[in-house]
Amino acid sequence: MAIDKPYLDIPGTTVFDADRSRQGYWLNQFCMSLMKADNRERFKSDEAGYLDEWPMTHDQKQAVLARDMNRMISLGGNIYFLAKIGATDGKSFQQMAASMTGMTEDEYRDMMVAGGRSPEGNRYVGESTGASRDDGAPE
């Protein structure tokens, strides 16, 4: 039985739910392996070889190699697990978040200090057409 997921129409937002958790299980397990120094060293010395030890999809492995955080999220990655990749690369969470928005780190920081992203146009897809969600959720 399919479950209605009204949250899927929020622009620029991927909700990490049970389906995404299942999809990204091995990707997230790989990320957690990077908590151990010897695994970080093995990964840094041969990224593709280390990734081949994990039963991830080809697309997930390619996204890791490209450090495409948005793609990893769309393939089931959880940002809190993916942060282990950034830490392995010597990146701060702010640097990772900026890369995901297409902004420089300074632009991202300035946006966040100024109050974050405007909610206008970012609530749900139907908002821009004037459509009602009709799912009982507050608008």
Image: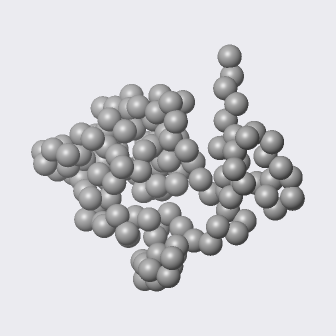
Residue at left offset 69%, top offset 22%: 2
Residue at left offset 46%, top offset 70%: 98
Residue at left offset 86%, top offset 58%: 130
Residue at left offset 29%, top offset 51%: 84
Q: Can you give x and y, in whole percent of width and height, for residue 54 in the image? A: 34, 32
Position of 20 compared to 25: left or right? right
Position of 137 compared to 59: left or right? right
Q: Can you give x and y, in whole percent of width and height, for residue 89 in the image? A: 28, 61
Q: Considering the image in quadrants, where does the C terminus appear?
A: bottom right
Can residue 41 be spotted in the picture? yes
Question: Relative to residue 123, is residue 50 depicted above or below?
Answer: above
Name the residue furthest top.
1
Q: Pick the residue in front: 75 or 57.
A: 75
Colour mode of the rendering: one colour
Q: Pick the residue in front: 80 or 28.
A: 80
Q: How many numbered marks have been drawn onto this rendered protein structure?
A: 0
Q: Can you give x and y, in whole percent of width and height, for residue 128 in the image? A: 81, 62
Q: Pick the residue in front: 110 or 63.
A: 110
Question: Relative to residue 123, is residue 137 depicted above or below?
Answer: above
Q: Considering the image in quadrants, where does the N terminus appear?
A: top right
Can residue 49 be spotted in the picture? no
